[in-house]
Image (cartoon, grey):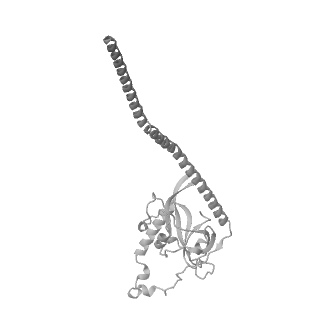
Amino acid sequence: MLTHLRRAAAACGGATSDHFLALRQFSSAVVAVSSVSDSDPTLPSSSDSQRKASRWLLFLPGAITFGLGTWQIGRREEKIKMLEYREKRLQMEPLKFSSAYSSDEELDSLEFRKVVCKGYFDDKKSVYVGPRSRSISGVTENGYYIITPLMPVPNCPDSVSIPILVNRGWVPRSWKDKFLEASQDEDLEDALPSPSHVDGSKSWWRFWSKKPVIEDQVASVTPIEVVGVVRGSEKPSIFVPANDPGSSQWFYVDVPGIARACGLPENTIYFEDTNEM
């Protein structure tokens, strides 16, 4: 009897130990599952953010390219319209220039319209802007734009009543060199005393000299007709040097600065000769 009881107790103890072992294994499995379930939600969120970032990286270049393409198309259409507008204006009959066009609004109405004016060129006050290259017969040559004041002609009703600046077109570099040489020669002649400065009353020359002949200092000039377009100053890029009026170095068209260098008001009107440009 006692032996049966011991065997039963041993059997119960073994079952109990097996039961506790199973419970321990189950609890550890639950803990592992819970830990995995706690860590799993973070993994999908990080992967989603990476996917979104990659999508944006793929979308952004396309969006930028589309925007630039649309901007270029719009800019091209604007340029086409501007060129058509200029061509229509240039094909109109030239207007006779009058000094009445003094305000900015009236000058803006003449934009890209051919205007006819008459006067004479004061070549001594010419300004050379450049250097500007030009291809002649397939050969590139450096030169300058020559800008000369167009002065009023006395007693000529068709002449301009105020001086204007005229861009007469492109000339070779040799023109500027000759102009500078002529200017230096004139400066030397002006520095030398002229015979008219000699006092004839204190020399024997008064016995042999004839009566002084008074010549008309205003030479007769023939009016020159210029067909041009009213323009404004150029907008230089950052690579263009600044103008140096003191040394007669003009790299871009600055209408007020060139007018001052020619002894004219800063609001002098600037023309581009369409027959020479």
Q: Position of residue 95 (x, y in %)?
A: 65, 73
Q: Residue at x 38, y 23 (%)?
A: 19
Name the one closer to the observer, 196 or 32.
32
As drawn, is 162 to the left or to the right of 241? right
As drawn, is 166 to the left or to the right of 201? right
Q: Residue at x 52, y 46 (%)?
A: 60
Number of on-image labels? 0
Name the one closer to the observer, 151 or 115.
115
Residue 82 versus residue 189 in the image, above or below: above
Q: Position of residue 131 (x, y in %)?
A: 49, 59
- Residue 140 in view in this figure: yes
Q: Position of residue 42 (x, y in %)?
A: 43, 39
Residue 189 versus residue 67 in the image, above or below: below
Q: Pick the quarter of the image with the C terminus.
A: bottom right
Q: Which image quarter: residue 100?
A: bottom right
Residue 228 versus residue 25 in the image, above or below: below
Q: Position of residue 125 (x, y in %)?
A: 49, 71
Q: Pick the quarter of the image with the N terminus.
A: top left
- Residue 136 in view in this figure: no
As drawn, is 136 to the left or to the right of 38? right
